[in-house]
Amino acid sequence: MTFDLTYAKHMDSIDPLSGFREQFYIPHVNGNTSIYFTGNSLGLQPKTTQDYVLNELEDWANYGVEGHFQARNPWVSYHEIFPEVLAPIVGALPEELVVMNQLTVNLHLLMMSFYRPTKQRFKIICEAKAFPSDQYAFQSQVLHHGLDPKECIIEVSPKPGTAIIDTEDILETIKKHGQETAVVLFSGVNYYSGQVFDMPRICKAAHEQGAYCGFDLAHAAGNISLKLHDWNVDFACWCSYKYLNSGPGGVSGVYIHQKHASNKTMPRLAGWWGHDKEHRFEMGPDFDPIPTAEGWQMSNAPVLSMSAHKASLDIFAEAGMERLASKGKQLSGYMMYILDQINANANQPVFEIITPRNDDERGCQVSMLTLKNGRQLFETLMSSGVIADWREPNVIRVAPVPLYNSFEDVFRFGKIIEHFIQHNQ
Ligand SMILES: *Cc1c(COP(=O)(O)O)cnc(C)c1O
C-alpha cells in the first residue's frame, strides 16, 4: 500500500474551503512556496491585513486624537466589533467576550478573579507539562498569595510511556482533591501532543466539587469546535496569533461566563476601560464595572493590533468554524494515514505518532516522536521547504491548517519523509 497524488488532488478539488488559501501570503523557501505547517505557532498573514492596518494609520494621520470618534471604526469603541465575530468561534455569548492585552497577562487577570485561595480551597489542578508560560503563571499566582506551589499545584500526568493524559485520571484527580481545589485549569488542546481535552466532562467534574473551571485555549481557538457557554466553562483565554492569524504578539481573547461577567461584585483588577462607558470620562473616584466581560478591560484598545485581528476574523466568519474544524481533522487524519504507510514500508518504525487518533481528541496538529535520525529528518524537511517545529528531545510537530493548507501539502510532506527514509535506513 502506498499513498498517491490523485487522492490528494481529488480531496482538494471537492474541498469547499480550498479557495481560502489564495487569501494568504505563504512564505517561500529556496524560491518555492513552502509547505507551511506551523500555523499552530504563528498563523499566516491574510492579504487583506495590510489594508485593515493602513486604514487605521490613515485615520490617525488625518484625525489625530479625533480618530477616537471620527475614524471609520472609531477607536473608542474599536474592541466592540469582536464579541459578535468571536462568539461562533468559541461558542460563547457576545457579552461573555472581550479582546484585550496578551495571553499570559489575561491568564493572570482571570486568575485574580477565579483563583482566590482560602484555608479550605487552595489547589489548582492542571496538566503536567503545561506550556511553560502557564506553569510560571500558576506558580507565581500561588506565591503571590503566600502559598507553596508544591502543595497547591496538582498536575495530572500522561499514562507512562505515552503523551496522552487519560480523561479518567483527570476526573479521578478532581475527585480526590476536590474539596481543597479552587480551580481546575487545563489547556483546551495540549501544545505538545495535540491532545484535545474533554472540556465538558472536566468542567462538570470541577463544578461537582465546587471548584471553578477555566481553559487556556491558545491551541484550541480557531482549531477545534468549542461550546464554552453550553459547557458552563467559567473562564478562558487564548492568543490570536496562532490559528487566528492576527500577527506576532497579537491581542488576546477572553471569555467569562455570563453569570460571572454580569456580576459587578466579582473581584478583579480594574482600569478605566472596564468602567461604565456612560460615565467613563467623568473620571469619578469609584470603579463601576461594565456588566459584561468588557468590565475586565484595563487599558484602552491597541487599535493597530486589533485591526489585524479584525482582518483575520472576517475570513473566519466567511469560512465558518464548523467547516474549518471538520477539515482540520480530515487533514490530520490523512497525515496519520500517510505516516502509518511510511512506517509500515520502512524496515522498522521511524517515528511514533503521539497525537490521539480518536477524532474527538485531536484538531489539525500531529506530533511525531522520532525514533531514529530525528533531528536529521527535521532538517531535511526544513531544507526541502517544509516549515515545521522541533521540540527537544525528539518531537516534530506539524499542523496542516484548514484555512490555507491543502491535502496536496500533506501528500508532498509524506513524499519528502518517504524519500528521506529510503536513503537513510
Ligand atoms: C502560545 C502560548 C502561550 C503564549 O503566551 P503569550 O502571553 O501570548 O506570549 C501561552 N500559553 C499557551 C498554552 C500557549 O500555547
Image: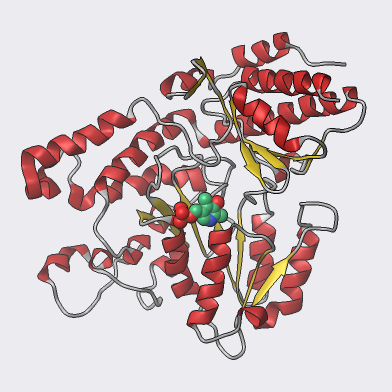
Residue 280 pos. (x, y %) = 17, 66
Nearer to us in this view, 214 or 4: 4
Camera-nearest residue between 260 and 388? 388
115 sits left or right of 291 in the view:
right
User: In this picture, is 19 found above or below 108?
Assistant: above
The residue at the point 33 percent across, 31 percent down is: 49
User: Quick check: 44 above or below 297?
Assistant: above
Position of 418 with respect to 251 (left or right) is right
Q: Which residue does the image show at 13% across and 42% down from the upper left?
A: 60
Residue 232 seen in this snapshot: no
Name of the residue lying farthest toward the right = 347
Q: Is residue 184 visible?
A: yes
On the image, the x and y values in percent for residue 195 come to 69, 48
Residue at the extreme bottom of the image, as rendered: 119
Question: Residue 360, position in %: x, y?
Answer: 71, 43
Q: Is residue 79 left or right of residue 55?
A: right
- Residue 293 image point, x, y percent: 38, 61
Instruction: Give the colour scheme shown.
Output: secondary structure
Quarter of the rendering occupied by the C terminus:
top right
Looking at the figure, which quarter contains the N terminus? Answer: top right
Whether residue 9 is situated above or below residue 193 in the rendered picture: above
**Residue 97 falls in which quadrant of the image?**
bottom left
